[in-house]
Image (cartoon, rainbow, N blue to C red):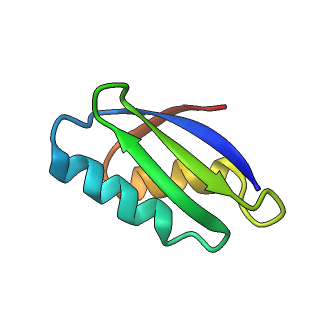
């Protein structure tokens, strides 16, 4: 299990954070998600054998936001 930081553009309210959280949690291999409006990012605990950076970016995009970087 590792933690990835996903930088997210476009979030400006709690509802936004909830959309992103739910979208990321739908990915098989995601154990935990913590979204910060203040920092404009999400910390995502993942099974690195099942989850790729592209999968995280796609989930953020599906929620209606832009994943500008994954570290």
Can you name the residue that lies furthest to the top here?
A: 39
Q: 36 or 62, which lies in front? A: 36
In the displayed structure image, the side of residue 69 where residue 17 appears, left or right: left
Q: Is residue 22 above or below residue 40?
A: below
Q: Is residue 39 above or below residue 55?
A: above
Quadrant in which the N terminus appears = bottom right
In the displayed structure image, the side of residue 46 where residue 42 appears, left or right: left
Query: What residue is shown at x 67% (from left), y 69% (from top)?
Result: 29
Residue 39 picture quarter: top left
How far from the left and from the top, in percent, is residue 35?
39, 44
Query: What residue is shown at x 61% (from left), y 64% (from top)?
Result: 30
Count how many numbered circles sit on residues in the image.
0
Residue 46 picture quarter: bottom right
Q: Is residue 27 above or below residue 8?
A: below
Query: What residue is shown at x 57% (from left), y 69% (from top)?
Result: 27
How far from the left and from the top, in percent, is residue 33?
48, 54
In the displayed structure image, the side of residue 36 where residue 5 appears, left or right: right
How far from the left and from the top, in percent, is residue 71?
66, 31
How far from the left and from the top, in percent, is residue 12?
18, 34
């Amino acid at each position: 299990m590792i933690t990835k930081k996903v930088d997210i553009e476009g979030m400006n309210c709690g509802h936004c954070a909830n959309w992103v959280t739910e979208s990321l949690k739908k990915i098989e291999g995601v154990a935990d998600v913590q979204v910060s409006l203040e920092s404009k990012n999400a910390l995502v605990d993942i099974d690195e054998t099942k989850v790729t950076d592209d999968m995280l970016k796609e989930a953020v995009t599906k929620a209606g936001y832009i994943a500008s970087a994954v570290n």
